[in-house]
Amino acid sequence: MANEQETTHVVVDQTKQQKRKKRRNWLPLEANPEVLTKYARALGAPSSSSFADVYGLEEELLAMVPGKALALLLLFPITKTYEDKRVEQQKELTKLKDEREKDDEERDSSSFPYFTRQTIGNACGTVGLLHSFAPIAGKVGSSAFAAGSFFERFYSATASMGFDERAEYLESPVDDADDDDDDDDEGGEQKKKESEKKGEGEQGDETAKKRRSEEEKKTRAALAASIDAAHAAAAVAGDTRPPGADEDVDLHFVAFVETGGRLWELDGRKIFPVDHGATSPETLLRDAAAAIKKEFVDSATAEGSINFNLLALVEGAPPEDGE
């Protein structure tokens, strides 16, 4: 399978989009195991994990994967058949999402995967990484990642957030529209007068609230800077020249993980995870390969599209060159 680039297709909440001054758009990533391993480690991934090529979906080729698969990352062509199916599938996923949101206690269930939407152009590779490493955070906590790293801080900050909130956190680390600290207008002057009328206890609460807000903004700004720099470096580190940030590339990354004994397809373009049935940590690779063949490969190859690339996130560092 040849290395390919990820798609520019994204899903954006239209109401929030209107509030943004400028959409963020990244360069596409190459489906290259060395590049993605280096990128993931720059974000704080454990040195005991790495990406490896999966050379095919047949049993003998799956057996060549060098280690236990923790997640699968698929790059596939977006065909008309796939898009038609995705649009139809959204109806059922919307229903599932609505049912889940009725029960807030279910949101943090250990049987449900960490999931985020994708709202940054060309970010499906990075969103795929977030989905691939999330089960590690879910099982052992954010301490599994390098202290102070992007992964540690992002998973910790977004653990209790909803799908769209996580996407917004990644895309807009500092939301100027919500900045209430400017007192250069009549509204600011009015707030100042109201503050003067408050008792000392209330003023103390306001001061603490403002301090927490400022600390959060600094944290989010630091996260934005770290992910932007790491992604930019990874995008130009592949074997092929990356398409421009604004070019339309009809290829897309999705992740497959095991959570709660189920095989989940995690695609930031969709509004909810897709459940592909029972699996286990031991059979994840084989079960994901079967689902990928049925849901992606068979229909795409029937239309003449063969640009697939499958990577496995595995336990163990990659071998040195020449080994």
Image (cartoon, helix red, strand yellow):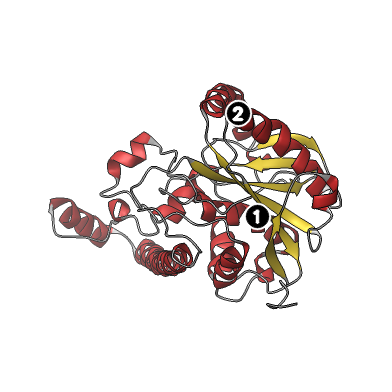
Q: Secondary structure at mark 2?
A: helix
Kindly identify which residue carries mark 2.
93
Residue 319 is drawn in which quadrant? Answer: bottom right
Residue 162 is drawn in which quadrant? Answer: top right
Q: Going 50% across and 64% down the picture, which residue do you hit? A: 238
Q: Residues within 10 Å of mark 1 (few under 14, many from 20)?
A: many
Q: Going 19% across and 56% down the picture, which residue do you hit? A: 188
Q: Is residue 145 above or below residue 161?
A: below
Q: Secondary structure at mark 1?
A: helix
The residue closer to the viewer here, 79 or 205, is 79
Residue 27 is drawn in which quadrant? Answer: bottom left
The residue closer to the viewer here, 175 or 188, is 175
Kindly identify which residue carries mark 1.
132
Quadrant in which the C terminus appears: bottom right
Q: Amino acid at mark 1?
A: Ser
On screen, residue 292 versus residue 115, left or right, reads right
Residue 159 in sight: no
Disc 1 to disc 2, C-alpha distance: 21 Å
Residue 97 in sight: yes
Q: Going 38% across and 42% down the picture, which residue do you hit? A: 248
State the image coordinates of residue 54 (x, y, percent, origin top left). 72, 53
State the image coordinates of residue 169 (x, y, percent, origin top left). 45, 54
State the image coordinates of residue 221 (x, y, percent, origin top left). 39, 66
Q: Is residue 158 above or below residue 117?
A: below
State the image coordinates of residue 281 (x, y, percent, origin top left). 83, 52
The residue closer to the viewer here, 62 or 159, is 62
Q: Earlier in the sequence, mark 1 or mark 2?
A: 2
The residue closer to the viewer here, 318 or 166, is 318
Mark 1 or mark 2, whichever is nearer to me = 1
Q: Amino acid at mark 2?
A: Leu
